[in-house]
Amino acid sequence: MTKKILQRYAVIKTSLALIVALVFSSCGQKNADAAQQMPKPEVDFLTVQSGTGEIDKKYPGLIEGSVNVDIKAQVSGYLEAIYVKEGDYVQKGQSLFKIKGDVFEEQVHSSEAAYKNAQANLATAKLEVDKIRPLVEGKVFSPMQLKTAEASYEAAKAQVAQAKAALGSSQLNADFSLIKAPVSGYISRIPNRIGNLVTPTDATPLTTLSDINTVYVYFSLSEADYLAYLKDTAEDKGVQLIMADGSIYEHKGTVEVASGNVDRTTGSISLKAIFPNPKKYLRSGGSARVILNSNLSSVLTVPMASVKDIQDKFFVFTLNGNKVAMVPVEIAGSAGTDYFVNKGLKSGDKVAINSIDALNDGMEVTARENTPVAKK
């Protein structure tokens, strides 16, 4: 009895296995048939040609006024008056700050008195020499007495010169108590308040004065980019600027070298772009991006939409018969919606310009020709 049950179980098990195999075989055949019936994707291809191109490279920069002056006290004292406000535009020679100057005025008075005293002593010494000289000839005074009088006269002259210098120094200190603008420009932050003690050794200036009628934008280039910039034969080397809000500055600038040497630690060289600033849009301390144009020769132009970016590596799909091949390329730069390719492609290659996310290496496609594009 048990033997018959086991035999029936074996027959049922075998039958089930055959049924499952038939089902999977049927599904696989349907999938294969479906795959064979699936239409090939239609892809547009562009025939690339060699030509020239112009690329834009952007470099971050810092804005400075053509003149940036730290205004510091030249004498010590208490701040008595502030004649300007932060953000004001001032003219050269305009009064900015006043340091309490009573002590300096007293020094001037004292120096004036010392100077007058020295002048009086000089006059007395001269009278003594004039008196003794004829008496020496009459042998009333000895020649030694005349020499002594003349030495006293020379000493009096030196004292007059010394007193005059001291008077000039005290007058300068008195003048320094009134701080004036050395150039025209905009007033920056004023950290001190009336009553604060200020000295020439203060680390923080009273304010900073910036002349921004013309501004300098400092930026750095790698040594390779700098050499490429020098070798660029473009006639117009005017540079553009992208302001902090992303807009293009309306005036073009010129570039000058700001440092004669390559920085050994960074391998870069500093340059400055000079821009006119009639509307005062650009302010000292701000940031911007400098745009440098470079000309390229013997490059191929492809649309950005045809390039696949995988982990910072770039690929395009080229047509080989009725299949596509995934080809790595090297991008030399970009302009507008195009990439410039200098390695990986050759003139005459056909590059897929749509449906690239659906393509795989070796996939069969239905190719459609697009108009060849050449950059001149």
Image (cartoon, rainbow, N blue to C red):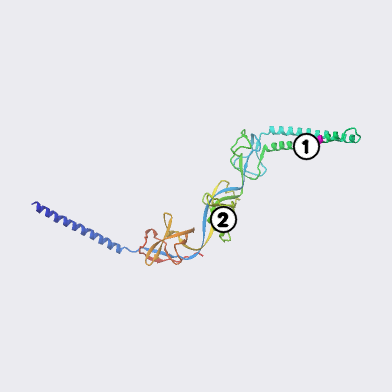
* Three-letter amino acid code at the position of disc 2: Val
Percent x, y for residue 154? 80, 37
Q: Is most of the magenta stretch helix, strand or loop?
A: helix
Work out whether 94 lies above or below 33: above
Work out whether mark 2 precedes mark 1 in sequence or the reverse, and give the earlier one: 1
Badge 2 element: loop
- Is residue 153 inside the magenta stretch? yes
Q: CA distance from mark 2 to mark 1?
A: 61 Å
* Three-letter amino acid code at the position of disc 1: Ala
The numbered dot on residue 307 is none
Badge 1 element: helix
User: Who's the residue at 74% across and 34% down the image?
Assistant: 111
User: Who's the residue at 85% across and 34% down the image?
Assistant: 144
Work out whether 85 lies above or below 322: above
Q: Is residue 88 left or right of residue 23?
A: right
Of residues 153 and 85, the one drawn nearer to the viewer in this rendering: 153
Specify start and end residues of the magenta stretch as a single range.
151-155
Q: What residue is shown with label 2? A: 239
Q: What residue is shown with label 1? A: 158
- Is residue 47 inside the magenta stretch? no
Of residues 97 and 245, the one drawn nearer to the viewer in this rendering: 97
Percent x, y for residue 138? 91, 34
Q: Residues within 10 Å of mark 1 (few under 14, many from 20)?
A: some
Residue at the outermost right position = 138
Q: Residues within 10 Å of mark 2 (few under 14, many from 20)?
A: some
**Splitting the image into 4 quarters, where does residue 348 fall?**
bottom left
Of residues 265 and 201, the one drawn nearer to the viewer in this rendering: 265
Can residue 294 be seen from the camera position used here? Answer: yes
Percent x, y for residue 94? 66, 42
**Splitting the image into 4 quarters, where does residue 365 fall?**
bottom left
Q: Is residue 23 left or right of residue 263?
A: left
